Image (cartoon, rainbow, N blue to C red):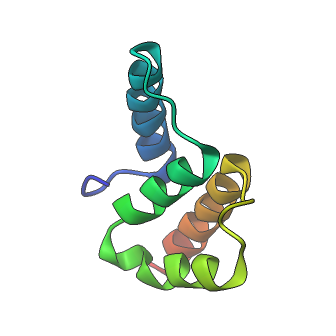
Amino acid sequence: MKENETIVEMITRFTDIVNGLEALGKIYKEYEKVMKILRSLSSKWHTKVTAIQEAKDLTKLPMEEIIGSLMTYEINLAKKL
C-alpha cells in the first residue's frame, strides 16, 4: 500500500495488476488474493489484519467481505483523526 493511498485506490490498483496477470495466464485463488491484500497493508493496519486473521477462515473469506471490512475500518480511522 502506498503512503496516503485509500483502500479503494489500493484495491483498484491491485485488481488491475491481478487482471493483467490473469490475462497472461496466471490465475490466483480467492484465498491467495485475500492474503496478498492483507500482506500489502501498511503498519497502521496491523491491528485490523490481526483481527481478521484470528476471527475469519481466510480460505473461505470472499474478496468483497475483506474489502468491505477494510473500508469500514478506514472510515473509522478517519473519524478518529
Q: Quadrant of the N terminus?
A: bottom left
Residue 44 position in % (x across, y down)? 37, 77
| Nearer to us in this view, 34 or 45 | 34
Is residue 9 left or right of 4 when viewed as pictured? Answer: right
Nearest to the observer: residue 31 or residue 51: 31
State left or right for residue 77 relative to residue 64.
left
Q: Position of residue 73 (x, y in %)?
A: 60, 70
Residue 52 spot, x, y in % from top left: 62, 76
Q: Nearer the viewer, residue 38 or 60?
A: 60
The residue shown at (51%, 44%) is 8
Task: Place residue 25 in its image quadrant.
Answer: top left
Query: Front-most of 1 and 23?
Result: 23
Locate residue 66: give its quadrant.
bottom right
Q: Is residue 42 above or below residue 43?
A: above
Question: Height in image: 21 above or below 14?
Answer: above
Quadrant containing the C terminus in the rendered view? bottom left
Residue located at (62% from left, 46% from top): 30
Q: Residue at x 52, y 83 (%)?
A: 50
The residue at the far top in this view is 23
